Amino acid sequence: MMNIEEARTLWAQSEEIVSAAAVQGALDTMAGEIASKMRDRFPLVLSVMGGACVFTGMLLPRLDFPLEFDYIHLSRYNNRTVGGEMQWRVAPAESVKNRTVLVLDDILDEGETMAAIRNRILDMGATDFYAAVLCEKTLTKEKPMHPDFCGFAVPDRYVFGCGMDVHGYWRNLPAIRALK
């Protein structure tokens, strides 16, 4: 367990890479793109807990069309900086069947988690699957998928803020920071 001084040290060892104003602008743009694609589809929107809770809370009020909302929880990180084994904590409900599903997550890193979510939801009978992320990490290796909607490409560094954490801390930041 980290203490407040260690959390402040992490802050000091990072730099802002996306300002709070840029995050707000990207959310407006994404909301417009999502609305133009889904306005008439009555989608089921699923938020991936816990990282996507801040992103979801910022994005949902910008979506000006009817939708149904729920959440799922699949984790690979568990407060670590390296992904591990996937663990379903809350699986998708049967309500995905015959639905257009939009999954919201904070970041698409290697794409493994979102690909597992996509596969599970499509296997359960969803008619369409879309992914929206605040950030996609720029990597040199191939990914199993890319998001349909994305706010920012971020460098291959450990990023946090806007729902993304570093060792369980700093999810509450309005901007995005990266460890140096």
Image: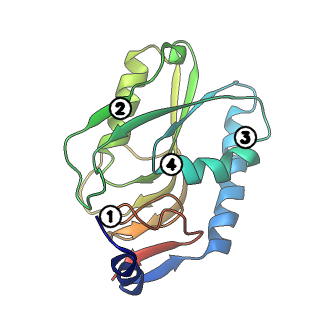
Q: Residue at x 41, y 15 (%)?
A: 124
Of label 1 and label 3, which has the lower sequence position? 3
- Binning the other alpha carbons within 10 Å of mark 3 as few (below 14), some (14 to 19) or many (20 upward) gives some
Q: Is mark 4 on a helix, strand or loop?
A: helix
Of label 3 and label 4, which has the lower sequence position? 3
Q: Is residue 147 above or below residue 66?
A: below
Q: Residue at x 37, y 60 (%)?
A: 168
- Is 76 placed left or right of 152 in the picture? left
- Is 164 placed left or right of 87 in the picture? right
For the residues bearing labels 2 and 3, Cβ distance under 8 angstroms: no
Q: Residue at x 32, y 64 (%)?
A: 167
Q: Which residue is drawn at 58% across and 18% down?
A: 99
* Residue bearing the label numbered 2: 89
Q: What element carries label 1?
A: loop
Residue lying furthest right in this view?
64
From the image, which quarter does the N terminus lie in? bottom left
Q: What element carries label 2?
A: strand
Q: In this view, does 124 lie above or below 101?
A: above
Colour style of the rendered protein structure: rainbow
* Residue bearing the label numbered 4: 52
Image depth: mark 3 or mark 4 in front: 4
Please name the amino acid that badge 1 sits on: His
* Residue bearing the label numbered 3: 35
CA distance for labels 1 and 3 = 34 Å
